[in-house]
Image (tube, rainbow, N blue to C red):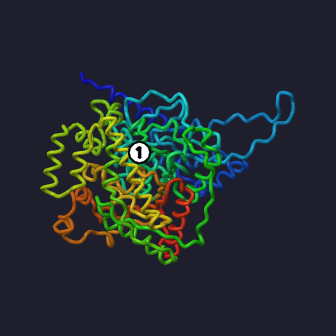
Amino acid sequence: MFFQSQHRRDCAAKQGERQKTLDGLSSSFFEPCTESDNEVLDLSLSELVQRHNAGSLSTASILNAYGKKVVSAQKATNCLAGIMIQEALVPKVPAPSTGSDGTDIPEQPAKLLSGVPVSIKDCIDIEGYDTTVGYSSKVNHPASSSSAIVRLLHDAGAITHVKTTVPPGLLGLETSSDLFGRTSNPYNAKFSSGASTGGGGALLACRGSVIEIGTDLGGSIRLPAHYCGLYAMRSSIGRFPCQGTHAPVPGLETVATICAPMSRRLEDLEEFWKRVVEMRPWEYDHTCVPLPWRPVNLQETKLKFGVIWEDGIVSPSPACRRTLEWVCDALEKQGHEVVDFAPPSIPEGLNAGLQLCFGDGGAAFFGAVRKDEKLDPVMVAIKSLLGMPLWLKKFLAMVTRKSTGDEVWASMLETIHLKSPAEERVLVVSRDEYREKWHQAWEDERFDFLLTVPHSLPAIPAGTAEKVTLVSAAYTMIFNILDYAAGVLPVSFVDRQLDGLPKDFMKSSDYKNMGLISKGAYSVYDADKMHGLPLGVQVVGRRFEEEKVLQGMKIVEDALEACGRKFIPREF
C-alpha cells in the first residue's frame, strides 16, 4: 500500500480547498469582462473610492469585474493561495441612523479606501484563514486575529478578496512550492514572476487587484515589480504597519522585513500610501512611527541623480543596462543633473547583511520545513553552505581565491555560518559603520536620488534560480541593509534586436574575467527568449523619504514620456 506523507496530504488538501472555493464561485466570474467591467477596472483608486462612497458603484460590481480577472489570472499564472470573494460579497450590516434613545447618530465620514480590492501575500495574518508562508506544516492553523495592515484596510473600507502565493519561507528568486505549485510570469509562462511576492506580482499584472500587500527583506516586492511591469516601494522600518506579518527569519531586527504595497499605476501607489498614513497606522501597530504624510512637489525642481552602474558582483545585462541608460538620458533632457556614483563597497555591505540573516545557522528559516518538502534551489544551496564544517569552507575559500580570484564568493564561503551572540554584536557594529559610510558619501555628493537596476537580469527562466543565486539580489537587498526608501517602476521591455550579448561573448575576456556568481547569472541570459519581458529601474532615497521617492518615480516616468518612451503595459 502506498504511503503518503503528512506533507503530501496537507499539500493535496490545501490545493483541493483552493479548487473547491474557485469551483464554488458564481458562473459569472468565469465569463469574459463586459464593457461595464472594463470601466470599473479602468478606474483609478481615487475614482473607485469616490464612486463607492457615493453609492454609484456597488461592492458586487467591483468584485464582479476584479473577480473575473482573479479567475483568469489564476488560470494563467497559478498565483492564488486563498480566495475570499464570496465572503467579501456578504453585505455588511449598516450602522443604525438613530441611537437607542431615538436621537440621530451623526453621519459616518467617507472611508478612505472604500471599495478598493487589495490582495494579501500569504505571510500576512487574516483572522480565520491560514497563513502558510509556503510551508505545509502551517496548513489548517487559521490566524486567531488579523494583522495591523488588514485591520486598518478593513476599517478604511478596503476589500481583501484573495491571498497570493509565496515560496516556502519567503526566500528565493522564484515563487514555487509543493503547497501551491509554481507561479509563472504573466508575460511569459516559462519565466519567473519574481521573488516571494511573485504571486501578487502576477495577479496585479493580470489586473486582479488594485493593490497587493507584500513583504520585502531583500527585494521581494521590488523584484516582482521589475519582472512583471509594476510599481512598488519599500519604506524605512516603522513607516508601514507590519505587526501580524510572518518574516522569513522571525525575530530578525538587524535586517528587518517590512510590509509594502505594489500597484499597476504609480498614481494609485502614491494615493494608497497617502491614505494608509492618513489612517494613523501607529494606532494599529506599536512599531509604526507617528509620522504624518508630508506632501512633496518636485515638478519644477532641477534635481541631482547619482547612478550606480555596477554592484561589484553581477554587471547589468544588456537589457537592464539599456533601461538605466534610457532613464539617465531622459532625465538629462529635462535638465536634471545625472552623475556616476561609486558607492561604498556593496559586496561588503551585502556580506554583513547575509551573515546577520543567517547568524542562527538557518534555524529559524529551516525549522518549519518538513523532511520531504521541496525548497527553492537558492535555499537548498544556502542550507548546504550553512551545513558545511567551517574548516572546509575556509579551505574552499582559499582554493576559490587562488583558482578564480573571486573574492566575493570566497568571502561568502568563509563568513556565512552560525554566529555567537558576541559575533552578532560585532556584525551590528560593522553594519552601522557601513551605514555611516553611505551617509557621508550622500552628504558629500548632495544627491536627491540614486538610480540602479533592480536586478542584473530581467525575469529569470523557471528553474534557474540556483544558477542566478540569492547574492545576485544585491541591487535591492543593499537598501534593506541601509534601511533606505526605494521604489521600482517599469520602463521598457527586453528587445532581441537591442539587447543581445555580443557574438562569442562566452569566449570573451569580459566573460572570463567575471566571478563565479556573475558567470552563473549570465548563463541564463538570452535576449531572444526573454524578448517582451518587462524591465524596471530602481529609484532610491534616504531613510523616511517615502513621499520624496514616490515623487522621484513620477519625475522619471514623466521624463520618459516626454522622450516618447512611456511604458505601456500589456493588457491581460
Is label 1 in a helix, a strand or a loop? loop
Residue 322 location in percent, x, y? 37, 70
Left/right of residue 555 with respect to residue 480 in the rendered view:
right
- Give neighbour class at mark 1: few <14, some 14-19, many 20+ (Cα, 10 Å): many
Extreme-top residue of the structure: 1
**Residue 185 visible in image:** no
Q: Nearer the viewer, residue 76 or 454?
A: 454
Above or below: residue 262 compared with residue 562: above
Q: Quadrant of the N terminus?
A: top left
Q: Position of residue 38 (x, y in %)?
A: 58, 56
Up/down of 564 relative to 140, above or below: below
Identify the amino acid type marked 1: Val
Is 157 on the left-hand or right-hand side of 528?
Answer: right
Q: Which residue is mark 1?
A: 255
Q: Residue at 44% across / 46% down in the picture?
A: 74
Looking at the image, can residue 121 be seen?
yes
Along the viewing direction, whichever of 277 and 229 lies nearer the viewer: 277
Q: Position of residue 487 (x, y in %)?
A: 48, 57
Is residue 131 or residue 477 the one in the foreground?
A: 477
